Image (tube, helix red, strand yellow):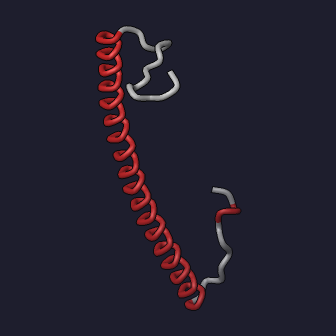
Amino acid sequence: MSGKDHTEIFPSWMAQTVMKACLKGAQTGHNLLKKKSDALRLQFRQILKKIIDTKMLMGEVMREAAFSLAEAKFTEGDFSTTYFFPEGVVGH
């Protein structure tokens, strides 16, 4: 450790009291930051779980949509260039 890490204090009862108060404040601040960090980590995990669940659901929906498209192409043929007009539409 270098000399820059030390605080110069005169060894007295008052200096000891002041340093104890500073130490107590630092420990309290550290504990509060630790609690905040834990809470943010928990919140992050919850958000991540939501994202993963949504992605899994999206995969199922996409698989079902691809199957429906394949089924429609199988039954009706390739309809990417064919236009379907319902009966009763005027103008054909």
User: Is residue 55 shown left or right of residue 20?
Assistant: left
- The furthest residue to the right: 4
Residue 54 vertical position relative to residue 25 in the rendered view, above or below: above
Residue 91 vertical position relative to residue 19 in the rendered view, above or below: above
Q: Nearer the viewer, residue 1 or 35?
A: 35
Name the image quarter holding the N terminus.
bottom right
Please state the horizontal and vertical placement of residue 31, each as a whole percent of the image: 43, 69
- Residue occupying image coordinates x 29% and y 26%: 64
User: Is residue 1 shown left or right of residue 83?
Assistant: right
- Residue occupying image coordinates x 35% and y 12%: 73
User: Is residue 74 shown left or right of residue 22?
Assistant: left
Please state the horizontal and vertical placement of residue 59, each as a whole percent of the image: 34, 30
- The furthest residue to the bottom: 14
* Quarter residue 42 falls in: bottom left
- Residue occupying image coordinates x 34% and y 25%: 65
Please state the horizontal and vertical placement of residue 71, each as a whole percent of the image: 29, 16
Q: Nearer the viewer, residue 90 or 43?
A: 90
Q: Nearer the viewer, residue 55 or 8?
A: 55
Please state the horizontal and vertical placement of residue 45, each as a whole percent of the image: 37, 50
